[in-house]
Image: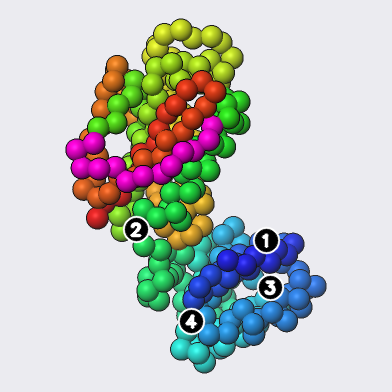
């Protein structure tokens, strides 16, 4: 993926399609620059315009989008607008062009017709955002340096045990799944002590809830990245399970990936599963 950043727009080129994110500060100078890129970015690919938080489209920018629309139509492709709010839609209707552009809810919805929508596979594209979010959240929230080990597919009947686990469901329009972050007691106590700035020597309800907070933050960061890729994952509420050496059954009938982590305080692991 190639990314070209501009003050008021960003172009992300993917295989078979291009996403253009427009910001609210659209101006004439940047429009002239953007107009010079229109032919290249819309050449034989589908084009998606992300209008998130965009209240209106100036006439010069509308002309650019109409040019992209004609280019893609010529190549038997199309342009779609996503994240169109009510104000922008009213403005498009006022200009009489609301039916000219195809409008979709989000990137996944926009790509469904093309066959390019991200698949529900436990591949690196899906796993890496959770891996990166786990490392980032522990470092920022608990000042704990975590590193990931060898990722592997959980075998049928294999049991992973922990003492405190945060669980959160993955829900979208096309698939379900779950993420579990599970700690042994020693690791969890040290992580919570660092996170809350107070030494804990036993598991209490106060710090058990911390597992849910960590899970929620990790899920939230990964969700942003995945939804930018079009996965359409919805907000969910975490739950916490505690108990010595407990194990959790897979919440779906699909594959389960295990990501082991190490910290100066001990090990923990993250499980990610998706429905088939």
Characterize the magenta stretch by its predominant secondary structure.
loop
Q: Secondary structure at mark 2?
A: loop
Residue that numbered label 4 is attached to: 78
Distance of label 1 from label 3 (alpha carbons): 10 Å
Residue 148 is a magenta residue: yes
- In the image, 31 versus 159, the foreground residue is 159
Secondary structure type for disc 3: loop
Question: Taking the image as drawn, is residue 208 in sight?
Answer: yes
Q: Residues within 10 Å of mark 1 (few under 14, many from 20)?
A: some
Residue 274 placement, left or right of 56? left
**Vertical placement of 17 versus 269: above or below?**
below
Q: Nearer the viewer, mark 2 or mark 3?
A: 2
User: Which of 180/36 is in front?
Assistant: 180
User: Residues in magenta?
Assistant: 146-158
Q: Which residue is mark 3?
A: 58
Q: Identify the residue at image location x=58%, y=66%.
A: 1
- In three-dimensional space, the C-alpha distance between marks 2 and 3, rounded to whole angstroms, equals 37 Å
- Please tell me which of labels 2 and 1 falls first in the chain: 1
Residue 59: in sight, yes or no? Answer: no
Position of residue 190 relative to residue 86, above or below, is above
The residue mark sitting in front, 1 or 3, is 1
Q: Which residue position holds label 2? A: 120
What's the residue at 20%, 42% (across, down)? 156
Q: Which mark is residue 24?
A: 1
């Amino acid at each position: 993926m190639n990314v070209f950043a501009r003050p008021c727009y960003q172009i992300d080129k993917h295989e078979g399609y291009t996403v253009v994110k427009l910001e609210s500060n659209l101006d004439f100078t940047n429009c002239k620059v953007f107009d010079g890129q229109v032919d290249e970015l819309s050449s034989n690919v589908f084009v998606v315009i992300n209008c998130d938080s965009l209240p209106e489209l100036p006439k010069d920018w509308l002309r650019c989008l109409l040019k992209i629309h004609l280019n893609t139509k010529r190549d038997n492709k199309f342009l779609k607008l996503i994240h169109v709010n009510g104000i922008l839609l009213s403005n498009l209707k006022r200009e009489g062009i609301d039916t000219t552009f195809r409008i979709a809810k989000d990137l996944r919805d926009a790509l469904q017709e093309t066959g390019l929508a991200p698949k529900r596979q436990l591949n690196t594209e899906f796993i890496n955002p959770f891996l990166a979010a786990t490392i980032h959240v522990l470092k920022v929230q608990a000042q704990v340096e975590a590193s990931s080990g060898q990722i592997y597919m959980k075998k049928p009947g294999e049991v992973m045990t922990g003492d405190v686990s945060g669980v959160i469901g993955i829900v979208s329009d096309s698939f379900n799944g779950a993420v579990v972050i599970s700690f042994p007691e020693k690791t969890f106590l040290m992580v919570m002590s660092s996170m809350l700035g107070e030494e804990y020597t036993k598991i209490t309800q106060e710090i058990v809830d911390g597992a849910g907070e960590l899970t929620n933050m990790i899920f939230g960061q990964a969700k942003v990245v995945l939804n930018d890729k079009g996965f359409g994952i919805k907000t969910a509420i975490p739950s916490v399970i505690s108990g010595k050496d407990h194990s959790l059954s897979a919440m779906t009938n699909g594959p389960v990936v295990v990501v082991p982590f190490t910290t100066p305080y001990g090990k923990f692991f993250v499980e990610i599963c998706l429905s088939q």
